[in-house]
């Protein structure tokens, strides 16, 4: 980048899920990644969108189509 030094500070930090708008391009560096980061430790699996009744019905239908021997 033409040997130009650009300072990096907390104001320019983009966290996971950040969306940039109204810009043609962006330069970035990775500061810390991995499963041991605080944001990844707080990430949760999305909740199931199937109701309990639908889950039970699927179990019943599966047992009817594939009997256990």
Image: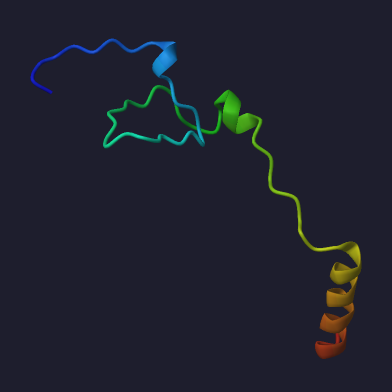
Name above or below for residue 40 compared with residue 4.
below
Percent x, y of residue 53: 91, 68
Q: Say which residue appears at 44% left-offset and 12% top-offset.
A: 10
Q: Report the quarter where the N terminus lies.
A: top left
Q: On the image, which quarter does residue 5 sit in?
A: top left
Q: Say which residue appears at 39% left-offset and 22% top-offset.
A: 31
Camera-side residue of 38 and 11:
11
Percent x, y of residue 60: 89, 79
Name above or below for residue 60 compared with residue 46.
below
Name above or below for residue 60 compared with residue 47.
below
Camera-side residue of 5 and 19:
19
Image position of 8 (left or right of 65): left
Image position of 24 (left or right of 49): left
Q: Say which residue appears at 50% left-offset and 33% top-offset.
A: 16
Q: For the view shown, which residue lies furthest in the left direction?
A: 2
Camera-side residue of 3 and 43:
3
Q: Say which residue appears at 75% left-offset and 50% top-offset.
A: 47
Colour convention of the picture: rainbow
Q: On the image, which quarter does residue 39 sit in?
A: top right
Q: Report the quarter where the C terminus lies.
A: bottom right
Image position of 5 (left or right of 52): left
Image position of 55 (left or right of 39): right
Percent x, y of residue 12: 39, 18
């Amino acid at each position: 980048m033409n040997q130009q030094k650009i300072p990096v500070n907390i104001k320019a930090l983009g966290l996971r899920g950040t969306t940039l708008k109204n810009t043609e391009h962006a330069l970035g560096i990775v500061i810390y990644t991995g499963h041991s980061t605080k944001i990844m430790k707080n990430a949760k699996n999305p909740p199931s969108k199937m109701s309990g009744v639908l889950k039970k019905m699927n179990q019943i239908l599966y047992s009817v189509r594939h009997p256990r021997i």
